Amino acid sequence: MFFTRLVSGVALLIAAVLAFYIGNLPLIILSALISVIGLFEFYRALGLEKKNIVYLGYIYSIIYYCLIYFKLNQYIFFSVIAFLLVIFAIYVFTFPKYKTEEISLIFMGVMYIPILFSYVYNTRTYEDGKYLAWLILISSWGSDTCAYVAGSLFGKHKIAPVLSPKKSVEGSIGGVLGAALIGGIVGFILSGHFKSTISPAFTCAVSCGIGSIISQVGDALASAIKRNHNIKDYGNLIPGHGGILDRFDSMIFTAPAIFFAIYFLG
């Protein structure tokens, strides 16, 4: 199991690094693919995967990513409203086929996964995006590693005893400090390559610290949903890791956190 988890983890990291480095079409395709699969896993966890209306969520996700890729951002808010009105109309004209809760969860899934995760690509579109996009990985996967190490060494106080009994306050703090430290070091080393980012070391350190805090919220949210619906993993697509949401749950929240942190700091 450890070897399988290690191999699949390394493969994921390599794929992410290549997509982040190349950017453009490969990254938007990978982001859209992860989003649609993640959305399917989310709907399945909630028992909605056999409802025909979920296909609207998948279709809209593709449309949304096309709008981003072709720089039609002025139509994004309109598209969100249009999607909401369409699912409301279906709810009304097929009543009582769907429940109110199901319609709400269809919309929530799209807001939660495709839209939040799209900020991976949005961050890459910054002028210094080739380097800034790495902060998303540092704030999610790097933070997880630092939190695990700190929690193993110093963990005494449980941060969420019922939801995540193995996670501690000390581990959480270690994750934030570790991510900020790694981000600061990366920013300092690459400072000569930045064109528009002010004080790269400071910006990267603070952004990673913020991203780490938000990533832990994303991780906890994914865990809470699984607990509510009595499932261990969202899927088994990634050997040793579970499903897409099991591996990218924190990154879904980290991506917009990093994007806006850079926007206000850089």
Image: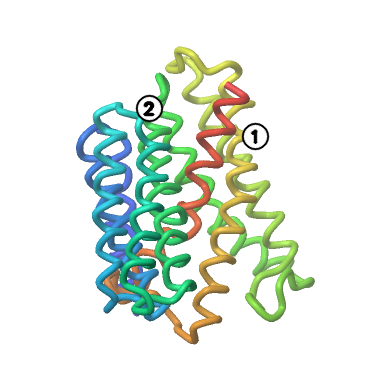
Q: Position of residue 144 (x, y in %)?
A: 54, 58
Q: Given the image, on which type of amino acid does mark 1 rest?
A: Val
Answer few, some or many: residues within 10 Å of disc 1's Cα (few below 14, many 20 plus, some between 14 and 19): many
Q: Is residue 175 visible?
A: yes
Question: Residue at label 1?
Answer: 206
Q: Residue at x 30, y 75 (%)?
A: 49
Asked which quadrant contains residue 193, the reply is top left
Q: Nearer the viewer, residue 42 or 261?
A: 42
Quadrant that contains the C terminus: top right
Q: Residue furthest right?
A: 157
Q: Identify the disc placed on residue 23.
A: none
Label 2 SS: helix
Q: Position of residue 99 (x, y in %)?
A: 43, 76
Label 1 SS: helix
Q: Nearer the viewer, residue 70 or 261?
A: 70
Mark with earlier residue (2, 1): 2
Q: Is residue 119 above or below residue 226?
A: above
Q: Is residue 95 above or below residue 230?
A: above
Q: Given the image, on which type of amino acid does mark 2 rest?
A: Gln
Asked which quadrant contains residue 173, the reply is bottom right
